[in-house]
Amino acid sequence: MRGHYPVETDHISLELNQVFDATIIIPAFFEGGRVTYNNIHYVTDGDYLIPAADTIFAKDSHFGFTNSNLINWVVEKNKGKVNHNDVVSITLSDIREGGILAVAEKLESVNQGATIVVNAVNQHDLNTFVMAALHAEVNGRNFLYRSAASFVASRAGLETKNLLSASQFSDKTTNNSNKNGGLIVVGSYVDKTTKQVKHALANTNIMGIEVNVSQIINISKQQANKTIKSSSLDLFISKLAITVENSITRGADVMLYTSREFVKGATLDDIALVSSVLTGIVKKLKSRPSFLVAKGGITSNDIASDSLQIKTARVVGQIELGIPVWKTNNDCKFAGLHYIVFPGNVGSEDTLTKVALKLGVTRKSDIESNKSNEQTNYMIEKLLQLRQAKQAIAAFNVYNLEGAQACVMAAEELKMPIILQVHPVALKFGGVALISMLFTLRKYASVPIFIHLDHSSDEKDIFMAIEKGFDSIMVDGSSMKYEDNLNWTKKITKIIQRENIIVEGELGLLAGEEDGLSIPEKAAKMTDPLQAKEFVKETNIDMLAVTIGNVHGPYRSQPQLDFKRLVSIRQNIPAHIPLVLHGASGLPHAMTQRCIAEGICKFNVNTDLRAAAMNSIKDNIKNNAKCDVLHLMEGSKTAMYKVAKEKILSFMAGK
Ligand SMILES: [Zn+2]
């Protein structure tokens, strides 16, 4: 009942230059739980029938209505142009007691230009009505139908089919050569969709990318006022398109959704604008996703017609009740694509999750079930999600505002979570002011920012971090003898984990002065896979930092990592424990890729950031006579931002 009525029906008459004998309103939609009885249109909610005007859908600021009675609704929507007397009802008794001929007679007897509303509670009712309408059409009547899908099935004589099963469509589940991830685009902002989005994010390994609605509206306003460049919105769209493209080509399934908070005062134009951003992103994709789900009426329409340029498609069936699956033909952007049209208000809370799973998205519990620890931790979850997507998180050592801002800026731009970590030396200098600054940045960031204490062997620092609510702490006993390291780590880990803070432990001795050592000497300092197995089991740490030839500080010769050792460590450690590599500064891209492939999901970056800052400062002092403190700060921030971005990109580009 929501939508452009009577604008659409009026326009169709006008464009066709035709006066119809009657406009027939048939909103019954059985797959979606919509029935019409005694002229009241109902929405099924579990075991209850709710009059349509009492549902959230009637509260829509643009398409809202107050009448559940279809006759009154027609009068309401026509704003006085149609009277109650002009509306004729085809009742259930007309259909069930009168049958085809009685209904046909009623249809043929209406005054020209009348509006007819049709009651129906099942497909049989509609079948009878359709036979009657055909009868009237044969006798020369012409009708304009405004209906939901159930009428179309009757009118076209479509047989009821079983729901499609998982094996019938997704490129991934049918062994197709397309190894790309799938894409779900969510535009609908109704409450039901919000619940479905949350459920799918919580229960599947789909990667959520939020599109900030307020930001879009702001950019558009500023663009109109000419306070920013006219291409700003286009740039916003391009950046998101790149993120989506990179993710799906890595095999990650992506859900692109508009921010869920209600945007006060949003107009129809704003909604059209947001829709144009979503369609714009999909339009820019070069790689074909393994499936595409569009959620919301406007979104699915615009993506089909504008982004994908679909001219014709075959409807192959329903994936869940009320959710049709199209297979595109050759006359569009991605031929042979399964395009799923998911209305905003159909299904229950878990329906989007069910659809995603059928399309080949993995269930979150596949990883979670391996966990020995009952309590789930958001940061660990994120790390494991990244690992599944063949990505890793960047953990940046920060010392000041410029460094922290630079890293957050890069993370927001690339829509990736990051870790901001504080080394004891930085902590000694910056103290609680430094910590507070990191938490403030995190509060206003648009991506997850985790705060970590790096390399700590000082219990005072560790307790401070617990108190301040750090996300994770690296308990570093690597300078101790193995036995002492194990016992101390075990003790401290227990204390930290009580607060649901995660613990990174380290095994192996990582230093910057390995260059002069012989190979056996180097090997002696590396992580022993069997010892690692015991260490993780005994201490119960959540993440393990490994030493496989990586060094702190700059690499003085070509870095050489012992990948065989890494594979062996991975095999000896439970799957739910993320592996960490320190000393990612100066590692060539191919090497980080191989590390990710073998299970590293956190890289520590320190030296490269500092070097970039120092070079910028030296350069500014040397070449800029008017250089002041702000110039130095700005320059170093930009330099560090470039490094951070490059590093995140390198860790994003898995596979
Ligand atoms: Zn380190």
Image (tube, helix red, strand yellow):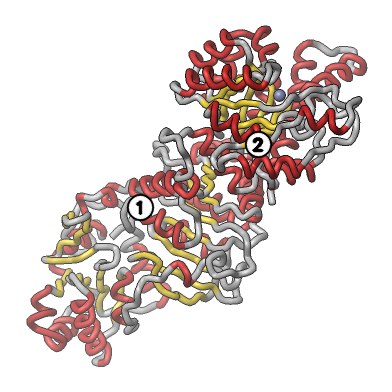
Select label 2 or label 1 by which is in front: 2
Residue 350, numbered circle: 1
Q: State the image coordinates of residue 517 (x, y, percent, origin top left).
A: 88, 26
Tell me if label 2 and label 1 are in contact, CB under 8 Å: no
Task: Say left or right for 523 vs 532.
Answer: right
In depth, the one of 5 and 180 nearer the eye is: 180
SS of the residue at dot 1? loop
* Residue 242 in sight from this viewpoint: yes
Give the answer, above or below, for where 417 lies relative to 335.
above
Answer yes or no: is residue 225 visible: no
Residue type at mark 2 is Leu
Q: Which residue type does callout 1 highlight?
A: Asp
Q: Residues within 10 Å of mark 1 (few under 14, many from 20)?
A: some
**In this image, 448 relative to 557: left or right?**
left
- Is 653 rendered above or below residue 26? above
Please state which of residues 199 and 121 is positioned toward the viewer in this rendering.
199
Task: Report the residue marked by disc 2.
Answer: 530
Residue at the location (48% across, 13% down)? 467
**Quarter where residue 321 is shown:** bottom left
Count every numbered label the image shows and give the total.
2
Disc 1 CB within 8 Å of nearest ligand 1 atom: no
- At 52% from the left and 29% from the top, the residue drawn is 540
Q: Is mark 2 within 8 Å of ligand 1?
A: no
> Secondary structure beneath disc 2?
helix
> Where, by quadrant of the figure, is residue 604 drawn?
top right
Neighbour tally class for label 2: few under 14, some 14-19, many 20 plus, Cα within 10 Å: few
Q: Position of residue 346 (x, y in %)?
A: 33, 58
What is the number of the mark on residue 593?
none
> Looking at the figure, which quarter contains the N terminus?
bottom left
